Image (spheres, helix red, strand yellow):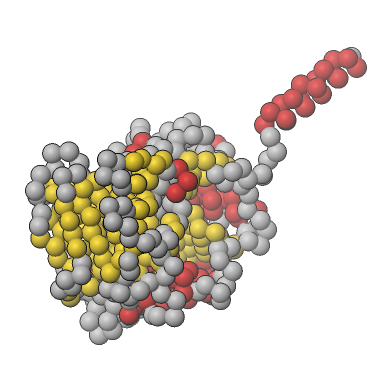
Amino acid sequence: MKKMRKISLFILLLVLLSCGCAGVKKPLLSGQDRHAEFGVFKKDERIMILVPHPDDEAICCAGVIQDALKAGARVRIVYLTNGDHNEFAFIVYERRITLRQGEFIHLGEVRQKEAIKAMKFLGLSEKDLVFLGYPDYGTFEIFTKYWQAGKPFRDRLTRISKVPYKDEPSYGVEYVGQNILTDISRQILDYQPDKIFVSHPADVNVDHKTLYLFLQIALSELEGRIPRPEVYPYLVHCVGWPKPRFYHPDLELNPPEKFKDSPLRWLRLDLNPAQVDKKYRTILFYKSQTASHAFYLLSFARKSELFSDYPELELKPQTAVPGRELVYSDASDLAREETFPSGLKKETAPEKESVSYAVEGGNLIVRLDKPKRSGIRFGVILYIFGYRQGTPFAQMPKVRIINIGKSCKIFDGKARLKDPLVRAVISGDSLTIKIPLKLLGDPDHALTALKAYHGSLPVDLVVFRKIKLK
């Protein structure tokens, strides 16, 4: 009997050793490798979840909320919009067609009430939820073009230019970038979170990527005033992902195939069966959305949640050498170096984004390798938003460069600029754009993205990355 007991204890010890120590945060992994575990939440830790629309927090962070509350952490959720622009969902849910202003506000109120019920089901109270009420599907245009008080963004469909929700803290404020930035900064300064979960810069939904941009600027402005929180972006919208659709509690959530071998660093939070079931039931509180998108939304109710971000890029000024140019890409430590016949050195990302950056002679240089057979109509939209310590972001240029063939148009917000020092050069296999740093406001760092087109079809998309310039 004693011998059997010793054997049983030995087997148990082997099992424990093979499972590893619970709660230990493993090193970050990349691509489609086995993703690093998220780790554990701590008692009294402050968790903030920034949400573009009501329901995003349920489909991407219901496991986070459950784990955090179980550990004794505090959770606050801040909603950028009320999701009042989802006309198709409104038609399916309400079973009627309307384009009246009041009906859009009504849909926003419906989604807010759904969020309150859903989060109460997870264990939060209404005081833990903050609804800012900015325009659904309008925040990216605000970020790029509308920063001047008195000249707000006006939604083309709702015809609203101020926050319309009377009981919320931002009621009546204009749809301008500074108001959104102030509200997000105020929430962070007041709450001082240890961890922030936010929508992903690679998300194809414009409100999702815009919330990430506002957070990056807010954290830069708050640098030195509060301890910098850890930031964990979550992905929602990516074409063809996740699959299979509908509820599959026995499956893990894996990154989209398009990010295989990318510099994204993925973290995985495991959910037990009870947590997955509770997440499933939480999503169902959003009846206005599940009426039309249940197969998609319930695809996220799986036994893991994923978070990832791109590493910050650092560019060091280079000295121009005739016949030779150094170009640094966004590949970070995952890059490999290639040498071209011209002597040009380039670091190419394994994810094949084929976009490179350099600082040389007081200019930011962006190079895109053209796809084969792209033709003369090949074009790009390049966004560059610079940040400089001590200068209000509202006063910094919001540069947008549109290049199609031999035509190059430059905009700062809504204003078109004519700067002869901006150069766009098309060669047989690449497009190189040179932008003076002075035009960008001589920034310390920049948030930049590039979208490429072949005719009217997008052929490449490089998501917003933070590039350190000084």
- Residue, x 30% and y 45% (percent of image)? 343
Q: Where is residue 102 in the image (x, y as percent from the top left)?
A: 22, 70
In the displayed structure, 277 sits above or below 396; it is above
Q: Where is residue 460 in the image (x, y as percent from the top left)?
A: 24, 46
Q: Nearer the viewer, residue 251 or 320?
A: 320
Q: Is residue 14 left or right of 313 when viewed as pictured?
A: right
Q: Can the viewer see residue 328? A: yes
Q: On the rendered image, what quadrant is the N terminus found in?
A: top right
Q: Is residue 263 left or right of 6 when viewed as pictured?
A: left
- Residue, x 48% and y 40% (percent of image)? 30
Q: Where is residue 443 in the image (x, y as percent from the top left)?
A: 38, 72
Q: From this viewpoint, which residue is outermost toward the right? A: 2
In the displayed structure, 431 sits above or below 32; it is below
Quarter assignment of residue 99: bottom left
In the displayed structure, 62 sits above or below 228; it is above
Q: Nearer the viewer, residue 198 or 421?
A: 421
Quarter assignment of residue 9: top right
